[in-house]
Image (cartoon, rainbow, N blue to C red):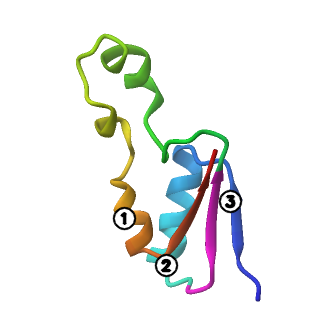
Amino acid sequence: MSGIVIVGAGQAGATLAETLRSKGYEGPVTLIGAENDPPYERPPLSKAYLLGEMARERLYLRPEAIYAEKDISLRLG
């Protein structure tokens, strides 16, 4: 079985995975990231989150459940 593996679970990788689904790609999509968290926005991490002004979950680009709903496999850590 063939599929698409995206190495890099940053904003570009997450956007590519979602775009594949929105354009009708039905094969397996796997998003691989070195970090333990799902794709997140890095600028707020260095500002609001570290200052305690933002909850961790608000950093995530999408709620983690969205990846499961769109049948995108996350391989993190």
Mark toward the start of the polypeptide (1 vs 2): 2
Q: Name the residue type under label 3.
A: Ile
Q: Which residue lies under the disc numbered 2?
A: 23
Q: Which residue lies under the disc numbered 3?
A: 6
> Would you place residue 72 above or below residue 43 in this image?
below
Element under disc 1: helix
Quadrant housing the N terminus: bottom right
What segment is highlighted magenta in the picture? 26-32
Element under disc 3: strand
Closer to the camera, 52 or 4? 52
Mark 2 burial class by Cα count in 10 Å: few <14, some 14-19, many 20+: few
Question: Of the numbered discs in the image, which one, if any, rests on residue 66?
Answer: 1
Element under disc 2: loop
Closer to the camera, 22 or 14? 14
- Estimate the x, y position of residue 16 in percent, counting from the top left: 56, 60
Residue, x 71% and y 66% (percent of image)?
Answer: 5
Quadrant hosting residue 35: top right
> Would you place residue 42 above or below residue 61 in this image?
above
View extreme (left): residue? 53
Mark toward the start of the polypeptide (3 vs 2): 3
Closer to the camera, 76 or 66? 76
